[in-house]
Amino acid sequence: MRPELEEIQRLEEYLAGALPEEQQLDVAVRLLWDQELQRKLAGQKLAYKILRLFGRRKLRTELETIHVRLFG
Amino acid sequence: MVSTQRVSMKTALLTDRERTLERIYAKAYPLVRHYVREHGGTDDDAKDVFQEALITFYEKAVFDQLTLTSSVSTYLMGIGKNLWRQELAKRSLQASLPETEELVEEPDVDPDQPTVALMTFVEQLGETCQSILVSFYYFGQRLEQIATQHGYRSVRSATVQKFKCLERLRKAVSHLSIEQLKS
């Protein structure tokens, strides 16, 4: 996997608190001074939020279909 | 304590979402509808409340924060009752305020607008990325399952693809601030 993708994976694991302790700390420290990384992390959080909204909407559509089939 | 019912419910939701949800729907919706009707609501109200409850249930069941101490129907009925009570309280508050019309119309239009705009970022990713990302991050499906569904030879390729898609989405939304989501 190219380095950019590995970084995305690391940030994902960081947010989940899933990195080994030392690496978890390492990312936290880098985030203190690395504005580029801060920006990437913020973007990634936003992406997760949007996916949640999108997923919810999709689930709602699926439930609507079930509703029509059963009670419509 | 890990209950067997919870584990198998989660598995059922992950492997056959449509049929599992349909089974739950058939059983639990009439109960919630009965409650809402008895408490001044319409069938449409009941549907909204029930679907909201079922979405909450799905998210909790799949992401493992749920310990069911009763049946799924009882659980959904509990959430449904709460939601309907909140809705009734909201409506009676709106009714007691002056200029009701404006106040009633606003929530229908405004909160949805930013959401609709944000949805397009996901839509622009195309069918494959959309499906991989939503399956993994929202529906909680395993990468093994996603790899099979999308014809990837290995979990590894599916993982790489997932991060590529996420990278594209992150790039697309990077000019937005997190504040724009707090509506």
Image (cartoon, rainbow, N blue to C red):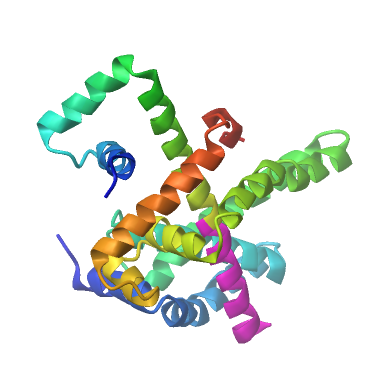
Q: Quadrant of the N terminus of chain B?
A: bottom left
Q: Furthest-top residue in view?
A: A33
Q: Is residue B24 above or below residue B55?
A: below
Of B134 and B153, which appears nearest the observer?
B153
Residue drawn at (77%, 45%), measured in percent from left and top?
B109
Of B69 and A61, which appears nearest the observer?
A61
Residue drawn at (17%, 63%), measured in percent from left and top?
B2
Residue B101 drawn at (x, y percent): 88, 42
Of B134 and B19, which appears nearest the observer?
B134
For the stretch drawn in magenta, the main secondary structure is: helix
Residue B56 drawn at (x, y percent): 46, 57
Q: Is residue A65 magenta?
A: yes
Tell me where residue B89 sits by quadrant. top right
Q: Is residue B96 magenta?
A: no
Counting labels gives 0
Left of B176 or right of it: where is B61?
left
Q: Is residue B65 above or below residue A34?
A: below
User: Can the viewer see residue B28?
Assistant: yes
Q: Is residue B154 above or below residue A2?
A: below
Residue drawn at (25%, 66%), measured in percent from left and top?
B155
Residue A5 drawn at (x, y percent): 32, 44
Q: Quadrant of the C terminus of chain B?
A: top right
From which residue to which does the magenta span run? Answer: A55-72
Tell me where residue B71 sits by quadrant. bottom left
Left of B64 or right of it: where is B135?
right
Tell me where residue B73 sits by quadrant. bottom left
Residue A57 drawn at (x, y percent): 58, 59
